Image (tube, grey):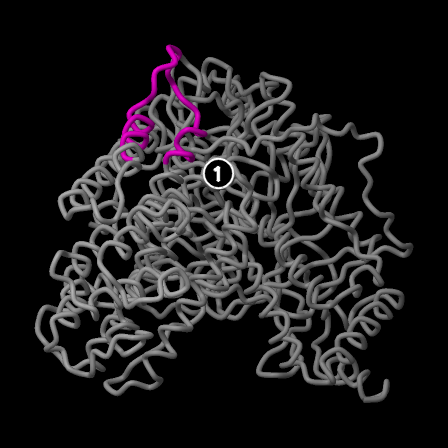
């Protein structure tokens, strides 16, 4: 495809772009950047925008980008558009200066609200603006943060008008939603487009995150602080973003259950005991932080966290109560507050806002209802509005208008009016072609190690696919885009010279008790899924030697089916071989089916998102075979492919996981489940009256058929089969092998005892090894197998009691029996 054809992307878009479009209205130098970028993208996609969109989407999926809408049970793919938004350095400098000024203004206003309250006392800020906010917490008054910094980060939603002017649509300080997505958008786009961004001299984002990390650390009490990212949990809409940021910044991802306050200090529960936390980057509203100080209904916070804050030994970003500044009513007063507090006009103005708690402003809103949008002043449900978001006055019918005006007359302070936002547009790929969409930018500001404000040289672009561009979170049909600041000169590479390298370490960091719990049960569920697949393969005719036929009447086949019934993979009622195996493989309603087990693997894995590589997610999310009454692909092929996938997961753990405590718990889970399954299978197929078919199937199920055949020149016999599968210390499928590995892992884990005596898991693991070591296959009895299984269950319970959280019975343990 020649250059002229490729440039038709730019020409075709400009022909359709409205006045004030980000590209169409660009200065000549920036217009050249736009054309060069579209030229490169067109060449890469061979002129097809849909191809480019698919390629970028695959890169986003490979990175594990995902999000949830309110009410979603499952995550959705992240909707990253393939065309970045470009802003020139000169235009960006104006935005950067304005946002730094705004962050400083908000910091000073928040500090005044929770200390002297001089702004209210002097009449510059109505008291009801403060006390009417659900994010104002009186208990924080007189509780200053370390070094006086209420804000460590600040985000602003900004919009560009058709004439090119930038204005602030909303201020956000409670949680920096979108910061991680901005970073992930850049990573995905860089992977998809090669050196495109470098060729355009796009500024890098990494220095901003380094500044943010230093800004959090400098306000902690210790020089080498331990900082955690507090998440509401994996069902939060932006959990994937939080996990990515924690991993990228080297922060410990924790939930409320992981933390405890003792003697005014915050600690995390780890397998090594309690470890002090110096700083907390919270990603939950102040309301949920401490049920004793804020909202008693919270179940995700940390009791007495307020006490740790009040004693001055804990840095929290942002400081509890800072969200008071987010109330929409504040926007009406920020221009005059800027003059009163900073002695300056706002560099980046708000959209015009009228708070109805003032008579003149209320009359203005009533008189111009058709020209404004009406919203809740404090982001709460109010009478007369369908929700707490903005509603255009012109869209209301007579009855709605009457109800709204009546409500405003009774409680005018609950309402604000704002001008209708007219946004500039930018290129997006819609239905396989370039088309203009209105956009907003969420731009992020952070305090660096010197206490100065630094603005991320980029941001999170949001292209409106639905009506509410002012909403805080992504909505249905919205798209995201990377926003790049383009310099006239090449951007120098980042360097660590002169910044002071950290001290070298060879430890893997702390392992919270909940993470250890999840890693252990992740291993158990993966192993159970593999063994269920081996049972299915044996029933479907995958045995190397045994001829079980297609009937369920043979004793060996009946035992195979009975084990699937016990594990909940199939119902107890009889069925033909094909439908039975199809149920065990793909029926989500059977809790022990492969589909259900892999769903649990994915759910547990979500709680470990900061610890698992993106390759793990690709394997887990691959579609499983589906069955619609008839088998759509052979059961043997389907089970073989699934076993290969699980083997790949095992390979990732074996080759990619650092040999830390986390790897040990994951491997212990697999060893525990494999040993328990070995005991059950030997009891089923290796009893004193076992047939040749029984022993052949047993060797197949425990993946030891080849080992047996290369060692013995006879058909399977009971004593050597028992020895190979139960007692052989060199067979990675044998019970004794699992016992040895469990004992080694537990011996390597930290101990809480100072007297040198073994803890209960160590004692039980060593006893199991000692119990099996002197036995041989001709000595082994079914009573020995039953004893080994009982000891394994006792060891599993002891591991849970010693290393895992005991706030409530683990849900994972309830599912595997």
Task: List the single residue furthest toward the right.
Answer: 489
Count of labels in the image: 1
Vertical position of residue 810 compared to residue 53: above or below: above
At a point 22% along the width and 61% down the height, the residue shown is 591
Q: Is residue 764 magenta?
A: yes
- Counting from the top left corner in percent of width and height, residue 384 is at 32, 57
Task: List the single residue furthest toward the front.
Answer: 713
Name the side, left or right, on which 748 lies relative to 173.
left
Look at the image and tell me whether residue 731 can be seen. Answer: yes
- Counting from the top left corner in percent of width and height, residue 497 is at 84, 34
Name the side, left or right, on which 295 lies relative to 559.
right
At a point 43% along the width and 33% down the height, the residue shown is 512
Front position in the image: 398 or 747: 747
- Quadrant position of the N terminus in the picture: bottom right
Dot 1 crowding, Cα within 10 Å, few <14, some 14–19, many 20+ = many
Look at the image and tell me whether residue 405 can be seen. Answer: no
Front position in the image: 698 or 106: 698
- Counting from the top left corner in percent of width and height, residue 772 is at 27, 38
Name the side, left or right, on which 547 lies relative to 359.
left
Q: Which residues are magenta?
A: 743-768
């Amino acid at each position: 495809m020649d250059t002229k054809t490729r440039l038709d992307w730019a020409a075709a878009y400009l022909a359709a772009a409205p006045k004030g479009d980000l590209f169409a209205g660009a200065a000549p130098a920036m217009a050249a950047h736009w054309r060069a970028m579209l030229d490169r993208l067109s060449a890469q996609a061979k002129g097809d925008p849909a191809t480019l969109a698919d390629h970028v989407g695959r890169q986003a999926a490979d990175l594990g980008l995902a999000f949830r809408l309110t009410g979603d049970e499952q995550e959705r793919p992240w909707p990253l558009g393939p065309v970045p938004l470009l802003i020139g350095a000169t235009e960006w400098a104006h935005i950067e200066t304005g946002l730094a000024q705004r962050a400083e203004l908000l910091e000073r206003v928040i500090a005044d609200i929770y200390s002297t309250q001089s702004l209210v006392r002097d009449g510059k800020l109505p008291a009801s603006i403060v006390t009417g906010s659900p994010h104002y917490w009186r208990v924080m008054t007189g509780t200053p943060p370390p070094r006086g910094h209420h804000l460590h980060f600040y985000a602003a939603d900004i919009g560009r008008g058709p004439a090119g002017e930038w204005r602030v649509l909303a201020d956000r300080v409670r949680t920096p939603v979108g910061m991680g997505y901005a970073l992930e958008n850049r990573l995905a786009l860089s992977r998809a487009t090669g050196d495109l961004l470098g060729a355009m001299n796009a500024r890098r984002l990494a220095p901003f995150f380094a500044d943010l990390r230093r800004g959090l650390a400098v306000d902690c009490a210790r020089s080498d602080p331990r900082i955690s990212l507090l998440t509401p949990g994996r069902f939060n809409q932006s959990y994937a973003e939080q996990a990515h940021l924690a991993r990228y910044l080297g922060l410990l991802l924790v939930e409320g259950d992981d933390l405890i306050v003792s003697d005014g200090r915050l600690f995390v529960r780890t397998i090594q005991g309690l470890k002090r936390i110096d700083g907390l980057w919270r990603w939950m509203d102040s309301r949920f932080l401490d049920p004793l100080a804020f909202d008693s209904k919270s179940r995700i916070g940390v009791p007495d966290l307020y006490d740790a804050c009040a004693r001055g030994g804990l840095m929290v970003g942002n400081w509890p109560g800072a969200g008071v500044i987010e109330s929409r009513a504040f926007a009406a007063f920020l221009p005059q507050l800027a003059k009163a507090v900073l002695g300056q006009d706002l560099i980046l103005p708000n959209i015009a806002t009228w708070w109805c708690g003032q008579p003149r402003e209320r009359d203005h809103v009533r008189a111009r209802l058709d020209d404004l949008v009406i919203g809740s002043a404090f982001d709460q449900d109010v009478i007369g509005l369908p929700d707490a978001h903005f509603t255009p006055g012109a869209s209301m019918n007579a009855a709605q208008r009457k109800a709204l005006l009546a409500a405003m007359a009774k409680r005018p302070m609950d309402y604000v009016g704002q001008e209708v936002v007219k946004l500039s547009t930018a290129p997006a790929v819609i239905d396989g072609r370039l088309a203009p969409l209105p956009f907003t930018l969420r731009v992020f500001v952070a305090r660096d190690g010197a206490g100065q404000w630094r603005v991320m040289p980029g941001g999170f672009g949001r292209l409106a696919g639905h009506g509410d561009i002012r909403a805080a979170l992504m909505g249905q049909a919205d798209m995201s885009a990377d926003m790049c600041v383009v310099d006239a000169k090449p951007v120098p590479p980042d360097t660590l010279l002169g910044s002071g390298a950290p001290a070298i370490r060879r430890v893997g960091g702390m392992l919270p008790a909940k993470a250890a719990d999840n890693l252990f049960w992740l291993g158990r569920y993966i192993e159970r899924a593999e063994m269920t697949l081996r049972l299915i393969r044996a029933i479907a005719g995958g045995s190397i030697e045994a001829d079980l036929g297609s009937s369920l009447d043979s004793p060996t086949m009946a035992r195979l089916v009975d084990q699937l019934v016990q594990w909940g993979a199939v119902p107890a009622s009889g069925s033909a071989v094909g439908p039975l195996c199809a149920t065990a493989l793909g029926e989500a309603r059977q809790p022990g089916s492969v589909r259900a087990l892999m769903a649990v693997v994915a759910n547990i894995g979500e709680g470990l998102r900061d610890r698992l590589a993106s390759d793990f997610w690709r394997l887990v999310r691959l579609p499983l075979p589906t069955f619609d009454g008839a088998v759509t692909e052979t059961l043997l092929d389907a089970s073989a492919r699934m076993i290969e996938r699980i083997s790949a997961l095992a390979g990732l753990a074996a080759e990619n996981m650092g040999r830390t405590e986390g790897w040990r718990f994951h491997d212990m889970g697999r060893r525990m489940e494999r040993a328990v399954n070995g005991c059950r299978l030997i009891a089923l197929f290796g009893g004193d009256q076992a047939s040749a078919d029984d022993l052949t199937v047993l060797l197949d199920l425990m993946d030891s058929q080849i080992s047996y055949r290369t060692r013995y020149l006879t058909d399977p016999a009971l004593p050597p089969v028992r020895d190979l599968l139960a007692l052989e210390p060199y067979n990675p499928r044998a019970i004794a092998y699992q016992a040895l590995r469990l004992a080694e892992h537990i011996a390597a884990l930290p101990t809480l005892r100072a007297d040198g005596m073994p803890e209960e898991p160590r004692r039980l693991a060593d006893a199991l090894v000692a119990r099996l070591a002197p036995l041989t296959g001709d000595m082994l009895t079914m009573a020995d197998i039953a004893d080994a299984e009982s000891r394994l269950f006792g060891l599993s319970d002891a591991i849970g009691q010693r290393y895992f959280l005991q706030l409530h019975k683990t849900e994972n343990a309830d599912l595997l029996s």
